[in-house]
Amino acid sequence: MPARLVWIAAALALACAAFLGLGLRGDPGFALSLRAPRLAALLLVGAAIGCATVMFQTIAGNRILTPSIMGFDALFGLLQTGLVFALGGFGVATMAPQLRFALEAGLLMGGALLLFGTLLGGRRVDLHRMILTGIVCGVLFRSLSGFVARMIDPNEYAIVQGSSFARFNAVPIELIAIAALLSLLALAVAWRLRHRLDVMALGRDHAVSLGVDHRRTLMLALATIAALVSVSTALVGPVTFFGLLVSALAHLAMRDHRHAVLMPAAALIAGLVLVAGQTVIERLLGWSLTLSVIVEFAGGLLFLVLILRRPAP
């Protein structure tokens, strides 16, 4: 195991200890029973988004793309607006969390498979067409969401607004077990693909010449990415630039193109950013800021930097 990966894991362990131990008052057991599930959710979401972004960038052949940039968050917003329009604010608010999670994750995964399969499933990947199609789909989803929102009662639209941002501090505890099961299964598939992804990073022609079934690996990787992003988004909400941020940090920290190193590094760095950031906001800043806003701001700046500089390899 690379030494840098060990140091990142040690930093994450310290951040987890601080998240669980700082500011404990009253009964420690009761406090830990509330904090431990939230910690598990932060680590789960970080691992899912980090690994999914690394895989997506590999099969897309570009380091400035993430599944969310390709319109995934807009699809989630359209789904939330459609649920409130169809069921009403009271119906959505009283829906069983497990049912709502299954509905959101299932529809998001189906939409993601359709979207990414259309963009990347052909014989040749046209990067410019892929970017334009993703932008157009995102604009279409946002336009439809805005159109439906105009027919919703303004009081009920507050539910849609509340679901439009990642909720790292309000994760439903009853959903963590099923989300963990689905994510761990998808992460296991991603780990089995690590060597084939190394070859896929060389390009389609080189991958085929080296004996990799390019189309089968591509579709399996897309299904895995769709599962990871769908589960994490249904659990906490959309995070557009978070994956880009942790993927860039993983490449910078490890300087290694092997996915056996990059994916664990991205997962650990994502967990470190979420856990350390949430600890600082809760224990030191007194909830004066929102972690999702800070993460999106930093990731958006990084995206602009990557766009304005020379194209990433």
Image: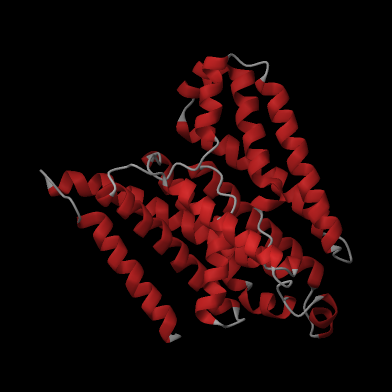
Q: Residue furthest right?
A: 123
Image quarter for residue 131? bottom right
258 left or right of 46?
right
Q: Is residue 165 above or below residue 53?
A: above
In which quadrant of the rendered image does the N terminus lie? Answer: bottom left
In which quadrant of the rendered image does the C terminus lie? Answer: bottom right
Q: Is residue 201 above or below residue 163?
A: below
Q: Is residue 214 above or below residue 298?
A: below
Q: Residue furthest front?
A: 308
Q: Position of residue 77 (x, y in %)?
A: 63, 35
Image quarter for residue 217? bottom right
Residue at 79% in and 77% down: 203
Residue at 55% in and 45% down: 233
| Numbered circles on residues, count | 0
Q: Position of residue 18 (x, y in %)?
A: 25, 60
Q: Position of residue 82 (x, y in %)?
A: 65, 26
- Can residue 294 be spotted in the picture? yes
- Can residue 187 be spotted in the picture? no
Comparing 261 with 246, the one in front is 246
Residue at 17% in and 50% down: 23
> What scheme was used to colour the molecule?
secondary structure
